[in-house]
Image: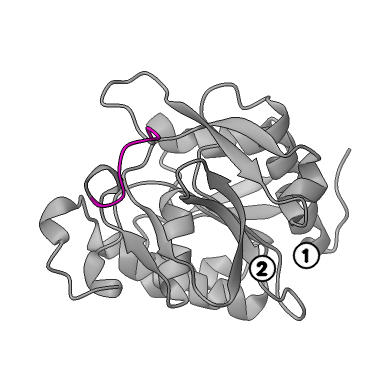
Amino acid sequence: MIIGFSKASDKGKYQLYVSWLRSIDPSFEYINFYGMDVREALTALERCSGLVLTGGFDVHPSYYSRGEEAHRCEIDQLRDILEFALIEKALSLKLPLLAICRGEQILNVSQGGDLIVDIPADHGSTVKHSSVTSELMYHTVEIDVNSNLYRVFRKTSFDVVSVHHQAVRTLAPCFRPTSFATDGIIESYEWFSPEDKGYLHAVQWHPEKGDYFNDLSQAIGKDFIEAAYEKSGIGRKR
């Protein structure tokens, strides 16, 4: 089975996404789409049984506003172009999608939602969503008991690793929120109506950082891996 990653560079923090999912199933192969041109990436995506949209720089605000806020963002427009194309094709193929941090944000923007440009300046700082040092920042998320997240995890709250200064402001109409931070920030979402759509799970936090053997990170990863194996039609190796 092959899983595609929007960015999974050979070194550094982007390999954590691969390591985390391989702690659940070490047998899958993966494709790193970052650095490919769009046509090459879309062709390679056809070989995949799932797509992980990983974290990274901010989505350019011109995609959800007039773009005058770009000076407050770190951007990578080539990555934006690539990921919008990957999302469109993944949805058409009904590939299982796991969207994390930036991935959760660009997926929302791709479907007509928008973002808070900077949480401390535009929303407030009652909850610290990121650290100015290398120390990991944690905060609590409250989980909707009617969500798929609750179905796989069976708990209503958990402390998650948080590394972001942007977040969903307006959720696209095709999605519904599944968890919140205590300051009201949407921390995860799923399809509003999942019928005739592929698997989708989007989280703002980083399940791959810190102790990714914790119950929540493992539950999210296992659920996605199972969906990818189901899509592949080959059955999960055990």
Q: How many marks?
A: 2
Q: Is residue 72 above or below residue 9?
A: below
Q: Secondary structure at mark 1?
A: helix
Query: Which percent across, then down, holds residue 206?
Result: 51, 38
Along the line of sight, which residue is nearer the eye, 131 or 156? 156
Which labelled disc corresponds to residue 231?
Answer: 1
Q: Is residue 173 visible?
A: yes
Label 1 Cα crowd, 10 Å radius (few <14 / some 14-19 / many 20+): some
Q: Is residue 127 magenta?
A: yes
- Amino acid type, callout 2: Leu
Which residue is at a point 31% across and 50% down the rendered structure image? Answer: 123
Span colored in magenta: 122-128
**Residue 96, picture quadrant:** bottom right
Query: Which image quadrant: the C terminus?
Result: top right
Query: Which percent across, then down, holds residue 233?
Result: 84, 64
Residue denoted by label 2: 95
